[in-house]
Image (cartoon, helix red, strand yellow):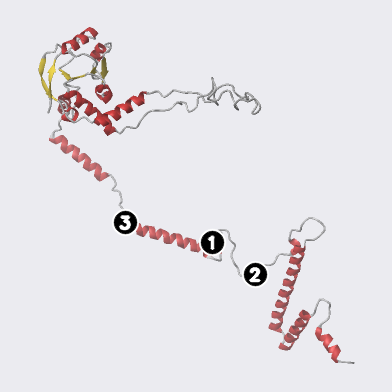
């Protein structure tokens, strides 16, 4: 583990401190540092450059001269890219140059930069700043006492206002907080100055341990009687609170099955009340009950007829068909009544008369009469 000497504000040695190998003892990764620094410099770019195309330049709406007959090259606008004062072809437009860099690469680049500076002996650790009041002269004297020349990165905490005001007017000094350390600022500087409290380390600092111990000491210790009283209070609350009913998986599944059975039974009852197919009951909740009566045909006279005096042949054919069906039903009903109360001979006579009437053509005569007339010469 590498170690550096600790100095005071006058440049005198005050011991030494070990540097954490995680930050100051690794092999620098040049490729990662290059990529991270390139991304950091690219993110600084504003990206506000802009050039006008031929469509954005004012003027050039008319054709300069006719297409043919002048002996010159054909031109459509004086704002074409080849003209003076014309638009720029494929020029830069506003854009963002930011690159997405993984966090692991950023941390590796920072550790590589710190390790490189530590290997060159350009990491300085101070015991303290030693400023009673803000003074730029005192800050310059401190740097001269340490022998630091060139660009210097000074790492200060946010609450060290005296040190910040003392160093901020020096042109070769760049102030950074511990959380603002980055690979570019370390690589672009010659020296990095820390204090013992701001030195990067993976181990907790002494100040953190002291604050943790003081917090534990400030916490009042409970007496045994108070501990027993607290436990009794918790037990009382637990007994008073209603226990939550836990449903077993088997009970939950049986409850779901019962719900499904009840739902199916309600659907069947609804379908039986509605009449007809049970599957159609859910689709037709207001379906009338099926009493078994045959549906009566619609009277052709009640149907809507087209406008005009001339009847539509389609309605006329429907009317004739309905009349024929009504006549057939009337005959069937008469036949059933006659078969119930009349003799068989009368029934046969009625059937014979119906058959003859059906066999009669539209002209009003039958083939049987014609045949009998031809056979009987008298």
Q: Residue furthest right?
A: 378
User: Crowdedness of circle 3 by 10 Å Cα count: few (<14), some, many (20+)?
Assistant: few
Q: Is mark 3 on a helix, strand or loop?
A: helix
User: Crowdedness of circle 2 by 10 Å Cα count: few (<14), some, many (20+)?
Assistant: few
Q: Are marks 1 and 2 in contact (CB under 8 Å)?
A: no
Q: Which mark is residue 249?
A: 3
The N terminus is located in which quarter?
Answer: top left
Q: Which mark is residue 281?
A: 1
Q: Which mark is residue 294?
A: 2
* N-term mark: 3 or 2: 3
Residue drawn 61% across and 70% down? 292
Residue 177 in the image: x percent, y percent? Answer: 25, 21
Depth check: give the residue in front, 104 or 316.
104
Q: Which residue lies furthest to the front in this view?
A: 71
Q: Which residue lies furthest to the left in this view?
A: 15
Horizontally, residue 181 falls left or right of residue 48, namely left
Horizontally, residue 38 falls left or right of residue 323, namely left
Q: Is residue 347 visible?
A: yes
Q: Is residue 182 visible?
A: no
How far apart are the two marked residues, 1 and 2, measured between alpha carbons? 21 Å
Q: In this view, does 244 lie above or below 45?
A: below
Residue drawn 74% across and 72% down? 324
Residue 347 in the image: x percent, y percent? Answer: 72, 85
């Amino acid at each position: 583990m590498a170690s550096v000497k600790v100095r005071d504000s006058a440049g005198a040695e005050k011991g030494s401190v070990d540097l954490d190998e995680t930050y100051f003892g690794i092999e620098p990764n040049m490729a990662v540092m290059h990529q991270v620094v390139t991304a950091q410099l690219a993110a600084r770019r504003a990206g506000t450059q802009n050039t006008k195309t031929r469509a954005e330049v004012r003027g050039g709406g008319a054709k300069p001269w006719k297409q043919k007959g002048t002996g010159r090259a054909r031109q459509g606008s004086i704002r074409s890219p080849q003209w003076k004062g014309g638009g720029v072809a494929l020029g830069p437009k506003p854009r963002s140059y930011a690159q997405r860099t993984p966090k692991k690469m950023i941390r590796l680049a920072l550790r590589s930069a710190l390790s490189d500076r530590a290997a060159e002996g350009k990491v300085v650790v101070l015991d303290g700043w030693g400023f009673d009041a803000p003074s730029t002269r005192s800050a310059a004297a401190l740097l001269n006492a340490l022998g630091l020349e060139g660009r210097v990165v000074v790492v200060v905490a946010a609450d060290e206002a005296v040190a910040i005001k003392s160093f901020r007017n020096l042109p070769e000094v760049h102030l950074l907080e511990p959380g603002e350390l980055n690979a570019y600022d370390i690589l672009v500087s010659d020296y990095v100055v820390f204090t013992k409290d701001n030195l990067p380390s993976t181990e907790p600092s002494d100040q953190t341990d002291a604050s943790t111990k003081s917090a534990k000491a400030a916490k009042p210790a409970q007496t045994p009687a108070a501990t027993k009283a607290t436990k009794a209070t918790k037990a009382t609350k637990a007994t008073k609170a209603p226990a939550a009913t836990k449903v077993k998986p088997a009970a939950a599944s049986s409850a779901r099955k019962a719900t499904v059975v009840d739902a199916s039974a309600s659907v069947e009852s609804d379908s039986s009340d509605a009449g007809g197919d049970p599957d159609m009951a859910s689709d037709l909740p207001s379906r009338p009950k099926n009493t078994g009566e045959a549906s009566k045909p619609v009277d052709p006279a009640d149907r809507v007829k087209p406008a005009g005096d001339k009847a539509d042949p389609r309605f006329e054919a429907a009317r004739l068909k309905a009349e024929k069906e009504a006549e057939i039903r009337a005959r069937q009903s008469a036949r059933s009544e006659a078969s119930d109360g009349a003799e068989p001979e009368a029934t046969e006579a009625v059937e014979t008369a119906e058959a003859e009437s059906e066999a009669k053509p539209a002209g009003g005569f039958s083939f049987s009469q014609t045949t009998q007339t031809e056979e009987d010469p008298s």
